[in-house]
Image (spheres, helix red, strand yellow):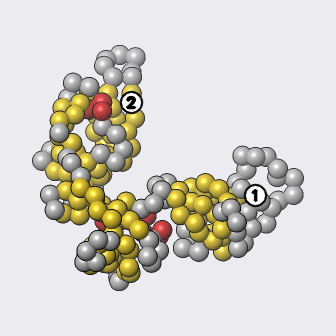
Amino acid sequence: MKINGNAIKPGNIIEHQNMQWRAIKCMAVKPGKGGAFNQVELKNLKTGSKLNERFRANEVVERLSIDTRKYQYLFSTDDMMTFMDAETYEQIELPVTLVGEQKVFLQEGMQVILEIVDDQPIGVDLPEQVIQEVIETELVVKGQTASSSYKPAILDNNLRIMVPPHITVGTKVIVATIDCTYVGKEKT
């Protein structure tokens, strides 16, 4: 499907320079001089390399259609991950690089969405939020009551994030998988 350059959104898969790319970040820029453009950070689906590109509204790019299928994450070995099709129970092995930095959030039995273009898996879509336990954090500094102050914490998947001062060791927190940020405290 052909789309204008200013219609590219994060997550879109496009054909550019005869390669397949995923749009990671998009920012509409309207400079004082000249026409507006869409500044897009692209990630190559095969090599993982990144590219920053400007697309003007009158430029046309090919947006690729993505098939999605539900899979269940089973386990990982050194550089491969095993998933099972939720309908056929067929297992598939994929390289860890397909998930990228979000691999720290994968938990056994987690339901994920596999993105497929031309019968080739190109990405794994995790749930937007996961629950993790805080295993290490600093004590609250007395007098540090500003609502915007955060402190570092290490989660049970060894990820380091910033949390509000009231979070203590053993607290289960909700974390956004897209940018590894604190969302809230798990309601019990």
Counting from the top left corner in percent of width and height, residue 91 is at: 26, 78
- Against 171, residue 57 (above or below) is above
CA–CA distance in space, label 2 to label 1: 35 Å
* Numbered disc 1: secondary structure: loop
Q: Is residue 52 left or right of residue 147?
A: left
Number of marks in picture? 2
Q: Does residue 175 appear anywhere in the picture?
A: yes
For the point 63% across and 71% down, the residue is 133
From the image, which quarter does the C terminus lie in? bottom right
| SS at mark 2 in the image | strand
Residue drawn at x 53%, y 64% is: 130
Observer-nearest of 49 and 169: 169
Whether residue 180 appears in this view of the structure is no
> What mark, if any, has residue 165 been given in the picture?
1
Residue 101 higher or lower than 109, as above or below: above
Q: In the figure, residue 45 lies in which quadrant?
A: bottom left
Is residue 181 shown left or right of residue 113? right
Residue 98, position as x, y percentages in the image: 31, 65
Q: Which residue is mark 2?
A: 28
For marks 2 and 1 on the same chain, the one whose residue lies earlier in the sequence: 2
Q: Position of residue 78 (x, y in %)?
A: 35, 82
